[in-house]
Image (cartoon, rainbow, N blue to C red):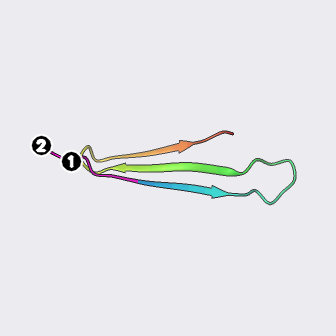
Amino acid sequence: MRLQMLLLREYFQPSGQEGYAPTFRRISINKDKNELTFEDIDE
């Protein structure tokens, strides 16, 4: 049995300007598959 190694980081940054949406991203790294995934999250 092999355990999957996954690192996850969520990033939020307010825009600081009126009328602009903040930045919210999720970055994940799958060490077993050697994959880097970026997701932009819209709220």
Identity of the residue furthest to the top in this view: 42
User: What residue is pinned by disc 1?
Assistant: 3
* Viewer-side residue, 5 vs 33: 5
Residue at the spot x=27%, y=51% of the render?
5
Label 2–label 1 contact, CB within 8 A: yes
Residue type (three-letter) at the residue carrying disc 1:
Leu
Quadrant in the rendering for residue 17? bottom right
Q: Position of residue 16 (x, y in %)?
A: 80, 60
Q: Quadrant of the C terminus?
A: top right
Q: Nearer the viewer, residue 38 or 5?
A: 5
Residue 3 part of the magenta-drawn span: yes
Residue 36, image x, y percentages: 39, 47
Circle 2 residue: 1
> Residue at coordinates 42% horizontally, 49% vertically from top-left?
28
Question: Could you tell me which secondary element the residue under label 1 belongs to?
Answer: loop
Kindly state the secondary structure of the residue where label 2 is placed.
loop
Q: Which residues are magenta?
A: 1-7
Tell me the crowding category of disc 2: few under 14, some 14 to 19, or many 20 or more residues within 10 angstroms, Cα based.
few
Q: Which residue is at 66% across, 39% downward?
A: 42
Of the pair 13 and 35, the residue shown nearer to us: 13
Q: CA distance from mark 2 to mark 1?
A: 7 Å
The single residue placed furthest to the front in the displayed view is 1
Amino acid type indicated by mark 2:
Met
